[in-house]
Amino acid sequence: GIAFVQFHGAMRCGESRALELANTARWLVPFFVFDTEFFGQDNVAPGGLPRVGPFKADFIKRSVVNLRRNLAARAANLVIRTGVPCEVLREVFEPYLNHGAPLCYITDRAVGKYAEAQQQKCLAVLREMGVEEQNIHILDTYSLLGEDYLRSLGPGINSLSVFHDTVSQALEALEAPLRDPGRVNAWPKPQLELEEPPLLGEDLGVQGLCVPMDFPYPDPRAVNGLKGGEDCGLEKLKDWLAYKGMLEVYVEFRDTFGSKSPADYSSKLSSWIGTGCISPRRVYSDAQNKLSNETQTRGAQRFMRELVRRDFHHYLALHDDGAEDFSDLAPLSDDDAERFDKWRTGMTGFPFLDASMRELRSTGYMSYWSRVVAAKYLVQHLKLDWRYGFCHFQSMLIDFDPIQSWYNFLAVSLASSSPSPTVSRTSDATLVSDSLAQSAEATLDAEDAEGAENAKGVEDAEGAEAPPDLDALFDAQAAPDAEGPWITQSCQTIAFAVDDGGYYVRKWCPELGLLPAPEVHAPDALDPEELRMEYEVEIGVNYPAPLVEIN
């Protein structure tokens, strides 16, 4: 028969279950659809922001171009179309309906409520056209362990540590990554016209990459050149694991910016994993191969644990009816809308947060700790619904993942002493709060005392060279559930800890460039005249006054 492969969540040729299955058919027709209901300024998420911003749009487009090139090397032509997926699907199938050969449809299982809804519409069209149920194959390419296995665990696993112990045998039994399928049985003369990838501005409605920041793209200050595509992803994985030996220092330095770019320490692989350019199983397997190296074992274990945490969040989503629920999202008042706008544009007067949000707006990238601080500030200090932050991240982050972002934001909200809506309507009403906030809630009673003491230690140290003990605050050994002590620390404590030298703040807030550390983290604490004369900073003039006071 004829196998139609719609590339969606796994944008790769190597290690492709879809191509492996399609090669059992006589002919292959691969295609990709740029969803016009997903891209563009007119297609907004519930928070009123575009579903996909310019940086991710550019990353996806580069990934499609790379996919087409790699398929061509395997004797196949990728059909690229722009439109509503279910309508395009009908157009792709119609020329072959009377061909006489059985038709087979293969794609990846959708992740996220929007994508799931679109996939259901496509399946309805297939059934309407008479494609037999046994010839429709929806493959799970998102998770490490597989959705069927995660569902089989049932609800009620209430911490990452318990989850890790539960799945440990399955992790040991993981199959090796698939081999490259090589040449495929491509349809010799495609009846469908091959289209070029759409223009971001004209065809997809995704305008200039750096508007309104007016920075060049890619921004020269970006920590990394995040270019979409399987080839770039594999090169990045190989370079980070094999050549730079980053696993040897991963645990010690992944959470710090220091005097060097954080690109030197963390992997930055999430963008390629999130778009399916490389698979989590490939990354896990390559890291596992480092366990035989004694100097890299601890870093490899920590790195692999992050991939297991990704599956843990997927497990939660599979048992949570409230995930991505915006039904009760209230409109922002005029005052709250203004405060939210200052938060997302990096004009809050809190330097570390401003630097983080400006980096996001200029590059589409944001470090792990920047995301934590942004979420905590939005929830704890601005008292805004964290789902607005979720929508902003969806619009701006290259590596945005609806499942991971939802549960990371939810964890911060649950750990707040005055959390915003948690949206946890599940069959097991306590599942989400038990899973994400168990250790956080256990420390809330001590938060005022311990948090104040930690903050006081930072303030008293002033010119001290050593930052707060990162292992004690954030390390997985100190917080085995990875939702423990760090999540209850203050925004300022985290800022001092991960950017003790002020390098990051000065990089993205150049108006504070003359300030030393730790003063650069709290310029409003200095005498205004001293600040103006010595450091050329005027609060409220060339740097915003604090939106809220942070102790």
Image (cartoon, rainbow, N blue to C red):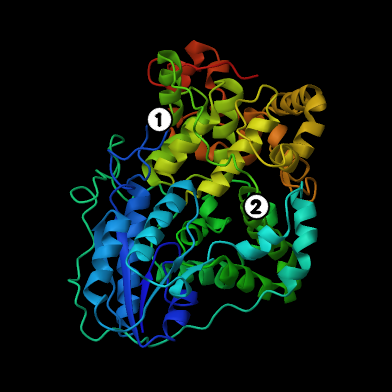
* Label pair 1/2, CB-CB below 8 angstroms: no
Residue 281 image offset from top left, x and y in percent: 59, 69
Residue 29 image offset from top left, x and y in percent: 31, 77
Q: Is residue 161 placed above or below 352 in the rendered structure?
A: below
User: Which residue has dot 2 on it?
Assistant: 253
Residue 323 figure quarter: top right
Residue 508 figure quarter: top left
The residue closer to the viewer here, 450 or 44, is 44
Q: Is residue 417 placed above or below 395 in the rendered structure?
A: above
Q: Is residue 85 placed above or below 429 in the rendered structure?
A: below
Total marks drawn?
2
Q: Residues within 10 Å of mark 1 (few under 14, many from 20)?
A: some
Q: What amino acid is labelled 1 in the image?
A: Thr
Checking the image for residue 345, the label placed there is 1
For numbered disc 1, what is the local secondary structure?
helix
Quadrant position of the N terminus in the picture: bottom left
The answer to whether residue 61 is seen in the rendering is yes
Position of 379 with respect to 334 (left or right) is right
The residue closer to the viewer here, 291 or 190, is 190
What residue is drawn where x is 40% and y is 62%? 8
Position of 436 with respect to 235 (left or right) is right
For numbered disc 2, what is the local secondary structure?
helix
What residue is drawn where x is 73% and y is 58%? 153
Q: What amino acid is labelled 2 in the image?
A: Phe
